Amino acid sequence: MKKFESKIRPIEWVDTYCRMVDQTKFPEKYEYVDIKTGQQMFDAIKTMIVRGAPAIGIAGAQGVTLYAQELSKNNLSFEEYKKQLIERADYLVSSRPTAVNLYWAVEKQKEIINKYSTIDEIITNLRINGKEIELEDIAINEKIGEYGAMVVPKSATILTHCNAGALATGGYGTALGVVRSAYANDPTIQVFADETRPRQQGARITTLELVMDGIPVTLITDGMCSYFMKKGMIDMVVVGADRIAANGDAANKIGTYTVAIAAKYHNIPFYVAAPLSTIDRSINSGDEIVIEERSHEEVTVINGKRICPEGVNVINPGFDVTPHELITGIITEKGIARPDYKSSIEALFGDKV
Ligand code: MRU
């Protein structure tokens, strides 16, 4: 199986700070911003300078390191240092509630904080662990790509929603990792990208990274997917996930559920691609997933211009949950989980063989 070579790296730890691509500037600018304090990292996650579940996991881990460096300048006792650092780590998790990778990565850093007995050791090992989480994510996505490419039909047109690409991860991408690996082995495949209202991750980010990597992509608006499915122009759907429950229910960008229903109606395979760190086995079903409610301006304003009358009611949930019955398979770095998800997910975690 051939691997695709992609140079896109949206987030990297450099010595004592984090350098990331500012995703709010796409597609006009591809600019880096240096994040040097914990509060800057909180704001970068909240305002979506960095976004995508695995990428905000990496950001969260590196944000803890930034707080650890800052607090070390405050002449605190070791116990007080640890207490304040754990408080700030938990605060970072509150920046975006739905993607479990943020919580997962911060918990990994909290294990380091609790393991070491000097401030220097904590900082050194937080840096090492944050960098490892970043690099490991790329390797995981390449494995997801490899497994996923095996279920992509020859010359397929793959529909995706939002951006689950290199720019949503350490690199290579989950859903777009599947696309990259499939394309490396069959350059006749192509992508249809949903625009993804309200933040337009499909239009601004998925198309950008596929154009950068030379993979054919066609942009459609969100309401068009069933039209193209009925015409027989979509062969499979692959999307990412922000949190997957033990029963396989998967939270992803708002609008994913609609795509899944349309795919089921048209007998089109619907796959979710995500690392095991996106699977939250502490929850039994998607009903337990907290859905982030975002600013109303994301809906009422486009490119600085209001598109609806003042005084209108607005609701803006950032994510929805696709029930497991609509999911053909969950592509992970350890293989593809299939229904019944409860047992196949347990098997992937090595609980049962
Ligand atoms: O609000 P966003 O842009 O962070 O939402 C991103 C998504 O919903 C992605 O599909 C998901 O995080 C998977 S990224 C590999």
Image (spheres, helix red, strand yellow):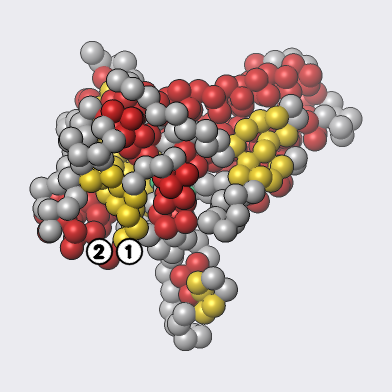
Quadrant for the N terminus in the image: top left
Name the residue beneath numbered marker 1. Answer: 221
Quadrant for the C terminus in the image: top left
Residue 90 in the image: state x and y as whole percent.
61, 39
Residue 86 in the image: state x and y as whole percent.
67, 33
Whether label 2 touches label 1, CB < 8 Å: yes
Question: Does dot 1 land on a helix, a strand or a loop?
Answer: loop
Question: Does dot 2 land on a helix, a strand or a loop?
Answer: helix
Q: Is residue 350 left or right of residue 16?
A: left
- Residue 113's place in the image compared with 315, above or below, is above
What amino acid is labelled 1 in the image?
Thr
Q: Is residue 168 left or right of residue 255?
A: right
What separation in Å lies between label 2 and label 1 (alpha carbons)?
6 Å
Q: Is residue 217 left or right of residue 45?
A: left
Name the residue beneath numbered marker 2. Answer: 224
Residue nearer the viewer, 139 or 353: 139
- Residue 313's place in the image compared with 158, above or below, is below
Residue nearer the viewer, 255 or 94: 255
Residue nearer the viewer, 311 or 76: 311
In percent of the image, x 78 and y 21: which residue is there?
119
Residue nearer the viewer, 346 or 48: 48
What amino acid is labelled 2 in the image?
Met
Query: Quick one: label 1, few (<14), some, or many (20+) residues within 10 Å?
Result: some
| Beta carbon of the mark 1 residue lies under 8 A of ligand 1 | no
Q: Is residue 186 visible?
A: yes
Residue positioned most to the right: 75
In percent of the image, x 29 and y 39: which residue is there?
272
Residue 299 in the image: state x and y as whole percent.
46, 70
Q: Is residue 290 visible?
A: no
